[in-house]
Image (tube, helix red, strand yellow):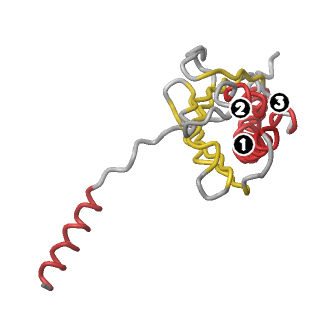
Amino acid sequence: MKIAILLSCFLTLACLGSARPKKDVPYIYLRSTDTLYIQVMDSVYVNGSSLGENDRFHRVEKILEDVLEDIKFPLAYKIERFGAQRTPPNQPRLDLTIFKWGNNGLSEVEARFSASIKRDYARNKFGTYFTRTPAPFGGYDRVMRAHNEVMEEAVAEMVMELNTRLSVGLLEEEKGEAEGENDVSESE
């Protein structure tokens, strides 16, 4: 028995020692000259209910616009449905994939989506964002408001991550411009 455990430990260490690291993916920064293309992929199944199914993209679009306006997001942006494929070369695209937006079966309203940013062939994953709140009692308007509020909270978390990439990108630009000013020859 001890030999089997020792052998399995040895094989595990040998496999871990010979494993290759993942390819280095360049970190994608946002520049002030970029236009951020936001692509919304909605893969939400509504359990036989037609609660907001027809206008879901427009509700997400409105929530994104409100959050970006609230924080005074300095980049130009365009929000598109999945499949638009209109992202010009060398421009960043933010992909939002909505997994859950509605009742989670535990008397809670939940919003869950993943986000990643892509520029040309490089992609960085932000992660998964989610929020929950107790399900409201009442009419259609109250339920829709609760859905929108949980999505707005999750989007606000994601935009904070986006803002850090923007501020770092702007610092990189300023550093590059400062180095460019020193390149002028003294004879001029």
Determine contact: label 1, label 3, CB under 8 Å.
no
Residue type beneath disc 3 = Pro
Residue type beneath disc 2 = Val
For the point 57% across and 23% down, the residue is 82
Q: What distance separates the C-alpha of mark 3 from that of mark 2?
A: 20 Å
Name the N-terminal-most of marks 1 and 2: 2
Q: What distance separates the C-alpha of mark 1 from that of mark 2?
A: 8 Å
Give the percent coordinates (x, y) of residue 86: 59, 14
Instruction: Pick whichever, 46 or 160, lies toward us.
Output: 46
Instruction: Pick whichever, 35 or 80, lies toward us.
Output: 80
152 displayed left or right of 107: right
For the point 59% across and 54% down, the residue is 105
Instruction: Pick whichever, 116 or 58, lies toward us.
Output: 58
Name the N-terminal-most of marks 3 and 2: 2
Give the percent coordinates (x, y) of residue 71: 85, 39
- The residue sitting at the bottom extreme is 2
Give the percent coordinates (x, y) of residue 154: 71, 46
For the point 86% across and 32% down, the residue is 69
> Which residue is tagged 2?
60
> Which residue is tagged 1?
151
Give the percent coordinates (x, y) of residue 94: 63, 31
Which image quadrant is residue 176 in? top right
> Which residue is tagged 3?
74
Marker disc for residue 54: none
Callout 2 environment at 10 Å: few (<14), some (14 to 19), or many (20+)? some
